[in-house]
Image (tube, rainbow, N blue to C red):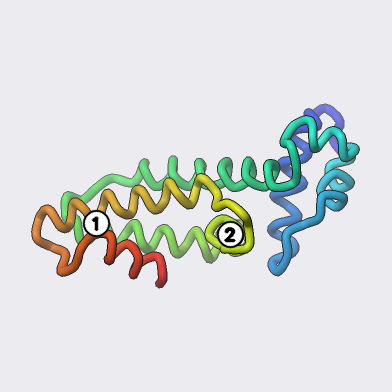
Amino acid sequence: MDNSRSARERLIDAATRLLAEHPHAEPTTRELYEAAGVTAPTLYHHFGDKDGLIDVVLDEVFARYLVHKHAVARSGDLIADFAAGWDMHIRFGVENPVLYMVMHGTSRSRRARAAQVAEEELLRELNQLAERGLLNMAPQQAAAATLAA
């Protein structure tokens, strides 16, 4: 274990690793603090509880995703740009299945802020398509259909 890293960083790293290693279940609080080499009170001090830690992990992973997404040059073709954004979103889900499931799943009492940001961006893009007459339904309906897919 690398003790030069802060306990907070080690907890985030452990949570990220455990979420990736166990695709069908979130790690327990004990698994998280033991994997980080800290005690339970350390986890509670930094994150409040297990959900707080997982929310931070999701937000950090998704923030990196958004930086990458926003760095992609726009073509000016709203349909092509929407399709490229969808492809990127699907690729993120395939590359990060557990994080994606936790982020968008319904098992948590509150959804990750990252999922809310993704939905806001989706709705913004769909509104642009509607404004140009390129959408045959209300943007909210299109968003619901897209998210269901």
95 in relation to 13, above or below = below
34 in relation to 107, above or below = above
Q: Residues within 10 Å of mark 1 (few under 14, many from 20)?
A: many
Q: Earlier in the sequence, mark 2 or mark 1?
A: 2
SS at badge 2: loop
In the rendered image, residue 119, in percent from the top left (x then y), is placed at 39, 53
Q: Amino acid at mark 1?
A: Leu
In the rendered image, residue 3, in percent from the top left (x then y), is placed at 86, 31
In the rendered image, residue 10, in percent from the top left (x then y), is placed at 78, 38
Which is in the foreground here, disc 2 or disc 1?
1
Find the distance from the CA under tag 2 to the CA under tag 1. 25 Å
Q: Is residue 131 toward the left or the right of residue 49 in the image?
A: left
Q: Residue at x 45, y 49 (%)?
A: 116
The image quadrant of residue 100 is bottom right
Q: Residues within 10 Å of mark 2 (few under 14, many from 20)?
A: some
Label 2 belongs to which residue?
A: 96
Q: Is residue 25 toward the left or the right of residue 79 in the image?
A: right
Look at the image and tell me in which quarter the C terminus lies: bottom left
The image quadrant of residue 28 is bottom right
The image quadrant of residue 105 is bottom right
Label 1 belongs to which residue?
A: 126
Q: Is residue 43 toward the left or the right of residue 131 in the image?
A: right
Q: Residue at x 53, y 59 (%)?
A: 104
Q: Is residue 30 toward the left or the right of residue 125 in the image?
A: right
Q: Amino acid at mark 2?
A: Asn
Look at the image and tell me in which quarter the N terminus lies: top right
Q: Residue at x 44, y 64 (%)?
A: 90
